[in-house]
Image (tube, rainbow, N blue to C red):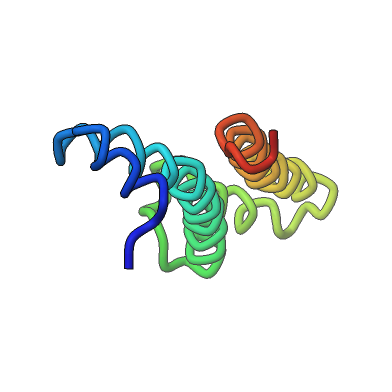
């Protein structure tokens, strides 16, 4: 099953590499960027949770989870690493959403 714009590009005489680059990759790029930013924010949350449990990066190295774990006894200080994690995850989400809106031809 072929899409009409791919058939039209073939009828005009586009080569196979040009067809793949100009039509297929351009259509997949917004979704790939969105999935990448979602996975990046998931990786930050996974690292922070493993670091908080003591299963992450070794303690001399800085880590969001290690910072949360160290600040556990001082509840007022635990706000700052938590806010850092929140801002980083929200930043990834907003960047991904903005790039999708910018690059998606269906939203124009």
| Quadrant in the rendering for residue 95 | top right
Q: Which residue is pictured at 75% across the width and 43% down the height? A: 83
Give how far across and how far down residue 6 sits, in percent: 33, 47
Percent of width and height locating residue 106: 63, 43
* Residue at screen point 61% across, 53% down: 70
Q: Is residue 52 left or right of residue 55?
A: right
In this image, 55 relative to 107: left or right? Answer: left
Q: How many marks?
A: 0
14 or 22: nearer the viewer = 14
Q: Residue at x 71, y 47 (%)?
A: 86
Name the foreground residue: 31 vs 18. Answer: 18
Quarter of the figure that contains the N terminus = bottom left
Identified at 82% across, 54% down, the residue is 75
Q: Nearer the viewer, residue 10 or 73?
A: 10
Q: Quadrant of residue 13?
A: top left
Residue at the extreme right of the image, as rendered: 76
What is the quadrant of the C terminus in the image?
top right
On screen, residue 18 above or below 51: above
- In this rendering, would 51 be left or right of 105? left
| Residue furthest to the front | 11
Horizontal side, residue 38 vs residue 97: left or right: left
Return the x and y of residue 20 as percentages of the image width and height. 25, 41
């Amino acid at each position: 099953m072929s899409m009409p714009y791919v058939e039209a590009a073939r009828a005009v005489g586009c080569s196979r590499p040009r067809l793949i680059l100009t039509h297929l990759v351009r259509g997949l790029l917004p979704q790939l960027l969105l999935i990448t930013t979602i996975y990046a924010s998931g990786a930050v949350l996974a690292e922070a949770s493993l670091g908080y449990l003591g299963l992450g990066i070794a303690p001399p190295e800085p880590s969001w989870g290690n910072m949360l774990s160290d600040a556990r006894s001082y509840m007022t200080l635990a706000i700052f690493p938590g806010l850092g994690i929140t801002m980083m995850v929200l930043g990834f989400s907003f960047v991904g959403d903005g790039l999708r809106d910018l690059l998606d031809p269906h939203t124009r």
